[in-house]
Structures are given as C-alpha cells and as structure tokens.
Image (cartoon, grey):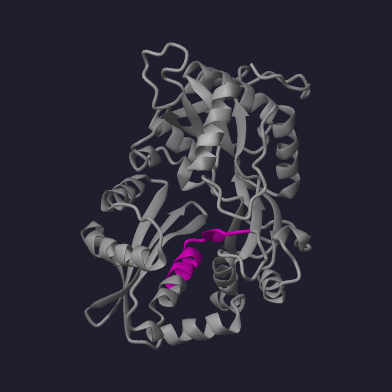
C-alpha cells in the first residue's frame, strides 16, 4: 500500500465492487456529480473495461451504504498476456472521481485502499481527476486581459475572492477552494504526480474549464436576463438576432442522429478536427437517457427545411454540459448556434442547475495563440474560467508509467 501520513489515525475505508444499481443510488444524492461517473458511461466508452467500486466505513454495519464511490475505467496495454511480467497491465482512470459524501473527503482514507484494489486488478498507473475548483476568474476580466495581450497566462490574473458558488459536490454541500487545496496537499503527500503545466489541452479532462454560473452566492437561480448580461455586447446582439431569425428549434430523438452526424462531419472537415462515429453518439444518447440520473438531449435548429445547427447537451443533477456542437456554413446571419446556446441556458435554469459548462480552454492569454479564439468565444458567452485540480497520476509500476507517458507525448 502507498505510504500515507498520519490523518487522525482513522482507519482506511474498505473497498469492494458495487452493482450499477447501488452506484446509481449513491450518486442520486450527489447533486453535482459528473456524468463521467455515471455507471452507464462505460456503455459509451466500450473500448475500456470498467468497475464500480464503493468505499465503506469498516466500523459501520454490514448493510451500510458507501461513503464514497468511483467509476473506474480500465485500459489494458496492448501486450500479449503470455508475457508474464507485462501481460494484463493497464491504466486505471477515474474521471471526475471518486465522488464522496460530505464529511468523508479524507484522501488518506480513500485513495490507498483504492490503489491497492486496482493494483490487484493489474493497474500500472492510477489516474484520478477529483472534482473541485481551486480558483475562478470572471469572464469579463479574462476577456479584457486577452484583448490587452499584457499577460501570458490566466494564472497571472487576480482570481475572484467571493468563494466558488456551485463548484462541485461532496454530498449536499459544495467543494470550494479550501477543500480542494487540502486535496491538493494530500495528493502530494500520498505520492501522486500533479499535471504538468501546459497551454494546450491535456489528454483527459482539461484543468482549465469555461463555466457559466447560473446561481448567485446564496445558491438562488439567476434570472435569464442576468445570465445573458454576462455576455459581451456582440454575443448579446447575436443572441437576440437569433430569436428573430425565423428559426425552428426542437428536441430531436435517436432517429435524428444521422442528420446530426452529417452536420457534425461537415463541421469537423471545415474546422480541421477528427470527429467521432455515429455509433458513439447513438450509445451516448441511449445510455445516458436510460439512467435515472442523467439526460442527454439533441437540439436541432432549422430554417425552413435546412438544418443549420445542432448541439448535444447533458444534464446530471444540478450540472449541465454543452458537450458537442455542429453548424452549417449556410445562413450564418441567422445565428443558429446562438439560438441553441440560449435554449440550453434556459433549460439549465429551468432544471435548477448551478453551472452550465462549455468545456475546456487554454490558460494562455497570448492573443495569437492557436487556441485563443476558443477562450475568446467562451468568455464572450459569459463563462467564467475555473481551474480544477486536473488529473493526478500514481505510478504503481514506475517503469511502465514512464513508458506510457513517453508514448502519450509522442502521440
């Protein structure tokens, strides 16, 4: 087991597999857990093996519910099992997990037994992306700094000092910067390696993310006008124009996914990125909607019979994500993508969400940096920038972990 410092001499939690049903019941009480921890998610990421693991207080009754849970995705190395030393080894990955109840968030009790369990399953590297927010910068300040070009990184700006409303859940409360800083210290004490500083996107979940806050500091939902007021003048004007552009906005079903895929492929070719296949979106739509925890919605914007924009949106509990978007090169002055963003914000507010997440961005404030346009767009939409803990690695087998890092860097 990994070496741990004294943490009040409390016993480590017991780890054992739990059923998808038990995992779902646990997450139902964690209002801001990510859909990446949903036990239906492995049916989308079919190239990975998976385990649902519960952590239990050893002093609790045998029928007690878990105090924490983790969906672990497992990717085996492409090495023949006949090689006894290397065969069957793999990466164990917990995106946005483990998820913990309030008052149980002591990593010294949680991570060592988890690692020991995963080691017995053949993990050579354990990667965790704990939920939590370290710092947060207001959208308008990031916009100004990016336009001025006087700073090199968002980290150089003064963060908000008003706390982190709606950060990420640990039970019914939220995990703000103080708890997250404690986790950061505990991860280091336990021998985890922090994410390397980068202005590019990391291979997993980006450390810097764009999120539109939908509640005030007391946790009350904001009026739609206040959310839209966070946008810059151009974005507000285009959003208002989209509502007068004779667009038809509707929610699609699985039969509309081929039309989505055609527009998405067009977008990928135009913008120069590698898209996912239709089967991925079919699995995503089907599995997340089969869960009582989550909702996956396909939005479509038409002008007459022409599909101009489409978006895939996910909501779980009090967190909402704009996950994928696609748009046509035609009829751009109708601002169909803006109309879909407005619909997703409205639906997130109606559902009582605390955040509407626009995904990752680069911390670079160089106006000429290739990803600067993405930061500019997301902050003009009114999204604050939050810095999460990022993904930390524990090398169970340092040699294999090093080889894996070299492979990923070359890739």
Left/right placement of residue 396 relative to residue 123 reads right
Q: Residue 137: horizontal and vertical position, in percent?
A: 70, 63
Q: Residue 267: horizontal and vertical position, in percent?
A: 35, 67
* Residue farthest to the top, as pictured: 84
Front one among 288 and 143: 143
Res. 12 image quadrant: top right
* Magenta span contains residue 378: no
Question: Is 374 rendered above or below residue 180?
Answer: below
Q: Residue 339: horizontal and vertical position, in percent?
A: 42, 77
Residue at 76 percent across and 63 percent down: it is: 157
Residue at 43 percent across and 37 percent down: it is: 24
Front one among 176 and 390: 390
Residue at 60 percent across and 44 percent down: it is: 131
Front one among 192 and 39: 192
In what quadrant of the picture does the N terminus appear?
Answer: top right
Q: Please give the range of residues in magenta.
A: 343-362
């Amino acid at each position: 087991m990994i070496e741990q410092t004294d943490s009040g001499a409390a016993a480590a939690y017991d780890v054992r597999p739990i059923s998808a049903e038990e995992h779902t019941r646990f997450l139902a009480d964690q209002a801001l857990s990510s859909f990446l921890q949903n036990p239906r998610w492995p049916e989308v990421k079919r190239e990975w093996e998976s385990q649902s693991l519960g952590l239990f207080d050893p002093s609790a009754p045998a029928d007690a519910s878990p105090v924490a849970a983790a969906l672990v995705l497992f990717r085996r190395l492409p090495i023949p099992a006949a090689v006894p030393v290397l065969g069957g080894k793999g990466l164990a990955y917990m995106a946005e997990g483990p998820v913990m109840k309030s008052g149980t968030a002591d990593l010294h009790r949680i991570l060592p037994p988890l690692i020991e369990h995963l080691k017995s399953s053949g993990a050579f590297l354990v990667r965790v992306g704990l939920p939590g927010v370290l710092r947060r910068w207001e959208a308008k300040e990031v916009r100004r700094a990016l336009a001025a070009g006087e700073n090199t990184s968002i980290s150089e700006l003064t963060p908000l000092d008003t706390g982190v409303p709606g950060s990420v859940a640990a039970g019914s409360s939220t995990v703000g910067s103080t708890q997250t800083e404690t986790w950061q210290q505990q991860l280091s004490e336990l021998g985890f390696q922090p994410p390397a500083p980068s202005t590019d996107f990391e291979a997993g979940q980006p450390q810097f993310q764009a999120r539109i806050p939908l509640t005030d500091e007391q946790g009350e939902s904001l009026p739609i006008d206040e959310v839209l007021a966070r946008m810059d003048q151009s974005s507000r004007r285009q959003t208002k124009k989209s509502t007068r552009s004779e667009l038809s906005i509707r929610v699609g079903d699985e039969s509309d996914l081929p039309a989505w895929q055609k527009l998405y492929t067009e977008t990928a070719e135009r913008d120069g990125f590698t898209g996912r296949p239709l089967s991925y979106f079919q699995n995503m739509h089907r599995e997340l909607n089969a869960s009582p925890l989550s909702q996956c919605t396909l939005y479509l914007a038409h002008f007459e019979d022409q599909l101009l924009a489409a978006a895939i949106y996910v909501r779980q509990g009090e967190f909402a994500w704009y996950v994928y978007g696609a748009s046509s090169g035609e009829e751009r002055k109708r601002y169909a993508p803006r109309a879909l963003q407005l619909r997703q914000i409205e639906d997130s507010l109606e559902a009582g969400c605390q955040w509407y997440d626009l995904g990752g961005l680069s911390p670079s404030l160089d106006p000429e940096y290739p990803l600067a346009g993405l930061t500019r767009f997301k902050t003009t939409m009114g999204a604050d920038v939050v810095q999460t803990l990022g993904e930390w690695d524990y090398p169970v087998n340092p040699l294999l972990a090093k080889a894996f890092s070299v492979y990923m860097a070359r890739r």
